[in-house]
Amino acid sequence: MGLGDALKRIFSSGHGVRELARRLGMVQEDLAPIMPAYEAFEIHKLSGGMRRILAPEASFKEFQRRVLRRLLGRLKAHDAAHGFERGRSIATHARHHVGKALVVRLDLQDFFPSTSEKRVKRYFRIIGWDRKAATLLTRWCTWDGGLPQGAPTSPRLSNLVNRRLDVRLTALAAALGGTYTRYADDLTFSFGDETDVLVERLVRTVTRIALDDGYVVHRRKKLHVMRRHDRQTVTGLVVNDRVALPPQHAPLAARRGTPRAHRRTRLADRTATRRVARPPAHGARAGCDRNVDEGPLRAPRPGVYSPRTASVFDAKGAFVQGRSRARFVTPGEAHASAIPCAFPASVVTRRDGSDHWRRRRFRG
């Protein structure tokens, strides 16, 4: 056996297409005709610019979910990866950086497209698939030379393929006396001490390590160095003393402890009530303008009043206009004006713009 035969035997070893079909629960002859099909569109980024999304067609998307569930879902990513992993979240990602003197956050440009097709195929070969099976898996999971952002398999593969990146950055953080975690393209480091020399060395080394795997680090727009006196945020959560929401979202997280004034403000924002006047008793003078309370929902009771009444309706009972002061009229004046309306009722305008009726309960 020559050297060429030995190398061919080494590189052709591994699980083949038959084993791939068995694990996917499909017939071997049905795998080769499967071709990727995507629909491309763009969405606006929160930080500005456009993001290109590649959404797979329905049948191919269902097949990618089968690959994710039967093959990729059983593989283990590095412990530093917290994005797209079961049992991990932005909270577990932020928890590693609570109470630190220095938090440094970096971002990788074009994370999914920069995860190259070559690295994906190499990963499939490393975990035990032969050349033909790895070629099929790479064809199903990549597009245009990288991971398609929008495919179900891309988030999971980005963690599996970048295991070496996470190992090297974890070792770097440990050598500098810090902690490292990653959530998708967001790299976060935290340290007990804060020095400018440490930050410069960290950024320079991370840039070099990321470049070895084909990534470019944002050095201007998305490099955040947060010291103890700053608001230290990791994936949108504040980690100065504990994992908490930013102040602008705090009232939503603790509604029971919200002061009464804040509850009244939210109630006023939720509905805008058009108030009406209390009608006087029969035979009383006109011009009553006393405010009344809201009662339970009830359909309006038709009546005949002048144009100066609080709530005016057309012949079918639909609301036309409302006023803050009402004038009670005699039956003769009402017969002369002949304007259909309902009283006592008012219109409450909801947030979505729709109207509903509320009957009024009067105070004595």
Image: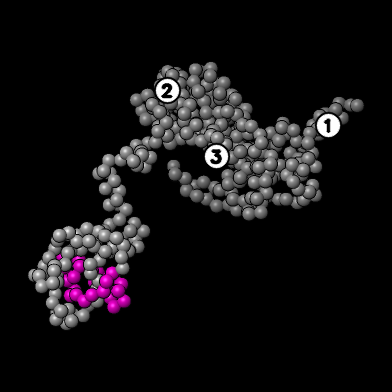
Q: How far, Cα to Cα, is label 1 from label 2?
A: 52 Å
* Residue 265 is inside the magenta segment: no
Determine which residue is flagged by label 3: 110
- Residue at 72% over, 50% down: 34
Please say whether residue 316 is visible from this viewpoint.
Answer: yes
Figure quadrant of residue 225: top left
* Residue 302 is inside the magenta segment: yes
Q: Quadrant of the N terminus?
A: top right
Q: Which residues are magenta?
A: 300-326
Location of residue 312 in the rendering, given as x and y in whole percent from the top left corner: 24, 71
Q: Which badge, 3 or 1, comes first in the chain's sequence? A: 1
Tell me the mark number nearer the camera, choosing from 1 and 2.
Answer: 2
Q: Which badge, 1 or 2, comes first in the chain's sequence? A: 1
- Residue at 59% over, 40% down: 155
Determine which residue is flagged by label 1: 8
Pointer 2: residues within 10 angstroms few (<14), some, or many (20+)? many
34 lies above or below 167: below
Say what amino acid the circle numbered 3 marks. Asp
- Residue at 53% over, 19% down: 174
Say what amino acid the circle numbered 1 marks. Lys
Q: Quadrant of the C terminus?
A: bottom left
Figure quadrant of residue 246: top left
Q: Does residue 117 appear to the left or right of 221 in the view shown? A: right
- 216, 264: nearer the viewer: 264
* Total marks in image: 3
Determine which residue is flagged by label 2: 100
Location of residue 251 in the rendering, given as x and y in whole percent from the top left corner: 34, 40
Q: How far, Cα to Cα, is label 3 from label 1?
A: 36 Å
